[in-house]
Amino acid sequence: MKKILAVLLCICLFALSGCSKGQDNKVISSQDGDTEILSEITVTEDIDIGGMDLEFTDNDKNSDYGAYNIKSTNENDEIIKITTDGVYRVTGKHTQIIVSVPDTAKPKIILENVSLACSDGPAIFIESADKVFISLKTGSENTIEDGKSYESSYDNADGAIFSKSDLTINGNGKLNIAGNYKSGIVSKDDLNIVDANINITSVGTSIEGKDCVKITNSNITIDAGTDGIKSTNSEDGTRSYVLIESGEFNISAQNDGIQAQTALFIKNGNFSIKTGGGAVVSSSNYGNEGNRWGMWGSYGQNQSSTNTESAKALKAASLIEIVGGEFNIDSSDDAIHSNSDLEIKDGDFKIASGDDGIHADDQLIISGGSLKISKSYEGIEATAITVSGGNIDVTSSDDGFNAAGGNDSSARGGRPGQNPFESDSDAQINFTGGYIFVNASGDGIDSNGDITLTGGVLLVSGPTNSGNGSLDYGGTAVVNGGLAVIVGSSGMATTFSSSSSQPSFMYNIDTAAADSFVAVTVVNKVIASFKPPKGYSNVIVTTPDFAIGKNYTLNIGGTVISCDSNGYTNNGTLKSAEKTYDIELTKVSVSKGGGMGGPGGDGMQRPGGNRGW
């Protein structure tokens, strides 16, 4: 496993000078400011972000051809053939449009209340051109469908709209597409969609651009038999990306919702994505009758390519970068998955997943946004995880946060971190800011390497069984800032390491019922509180208010005034308590009442380190 390193934020104006392969910066900003992609992740894959064209041309954005000499088409022809450059207006019912122009030509086709139905091939077949523009006339509604089988003369075409050249679809009209053979829209080069209203039902993939897919300000509804939107060129590190700047996206796909062979960039937009039948058809449940695959990724095999069939909502091989947007995801497989790196800077996410909520094989950075993962197997997983901001709410049937080396293998038979006593120096979880709530049935926070807490608020309701721990690590768990209240079972409990600079304590208690407040007070002031949704017998607390040599009171049950919906406050009032325990912080890490750390222990685990379960 390669070492994952973060780099300082830098700026690269790719319009002026590209970034070559192997360079560290991934900060992209277009010259006119329309596209701004910012990243703090080291480029470790063989991709060239600086060489990617992340802009739309003026012609991509222009669907008004009133000033052009518009060429007429024969309204009575079943097949309309375009053989010379120019602007063409098409209306009425036809079988097919065929474009075969010189490789230097860039014809424009205006669709105005057009109906195309071809029984033996694509409805629009672009055989040759430099680039073709299809514009949807404002106020028009256009319908396109292909045949259920194709004649061999169409040279491996597989879409109702099929282009061998660059293709742009723009305009404010409406386009309805039925991909009866395989796909809805296919470009074997670049595919741009601008200001369009498109509804697609397809047997296979709905939208495919081999070299790239770029979409802005469009309303797209997809019902796909396989993937929703994808780019597939794995041979060029500057290609096979998906860029979405804005728009409304309603995607139902049997396989992946949106996937890129290299990078997926999302700047903004409103996304409703359902894949594989939704989270109820869990990919991590091998015996699930509704799961036609048994398990996405062939049950425990290494998913090294986006070509592996899966039912992930957002997926890329090298990088996913999300700058903003609203996301409502219901996925059978991982909701957001990168085979390498992933960064979330902002956005509003509501996620229900049958497997991982958010997964990156390598580095995952979350610096902002609101993320609510209401259902998952593992909530947030990567080799190295850094949370510096945002509001995060995770519910998981296994680990809440998991840092473990190796590629995602999905649950049983190869889940990262599953080997007992495994320790990985690359694995790390760093909390530097944000507000994090975890409700995990497995380990709450689990790293095969280190855990660091230097800022933010961390609230963990961990396991009720003795086979897991609320805080689990193979290296050290160091706290040098931030506030944490972590509760769960006591059987495998461990606390923060004695190498920490900020004091903490762990205390084993008689089992407290679900929704029983944990509150730490000094005099009459609550300096840390939490209302865990599950029962617990072990409590770990750290806060910047702690000082060595001072005495505090651990209160269980009762009521805390002026707290949030999770029962958290660092400046509230305790109305009452059912049980109280005196805590004397005699050193940095104090453990009382037994547990793996032992009374007065330093919180380190048994020899061998992380259980990895």
Image (spheres, rainbow, N blue to C red):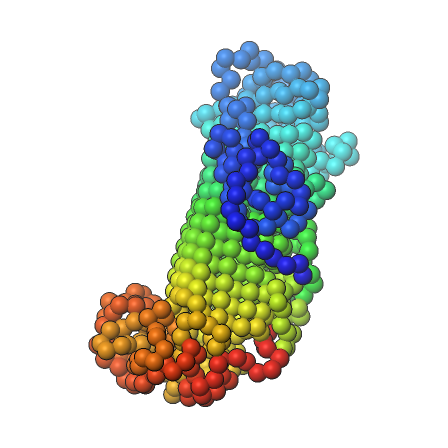
| Left or right side of 280 for 104 | right
Quadrant containing the N terminus in the rendered view: bottom right
Q: Position of residue 332 (x, y in %)?
A: 56, 59
Q: Position of residue 97 (x, y in %)?
A: 64, 25
Can I make out residue 412 in this image? yes
Q: Position of residue 528 (x, y in %)?
A: 32, 71
Can I make out residue 559 in this image? no
Q: Position of residue 84 (x, y in %)?
A: 67, 15
Q: Residue at the right extreme?
A: 152
Query: What residue sits 45% from the left and 57% below the top?
Result: 388
Question: Which residue is more in the foreground, 484 or 94?
Answer: 484
User: Which corner quadrant of the image does residue 381 belong to?
Assistant: bottom right
Q: Residue at the front extreme?
A: 549
Query: What residue sits 59% from the left and 70% below the top?
Result: 448
Question: Which residue is more in the foreground, 5 or 520?
Answer: 5
Question: Which residue is more in the foreground, 367 or 305?
Answer: 367
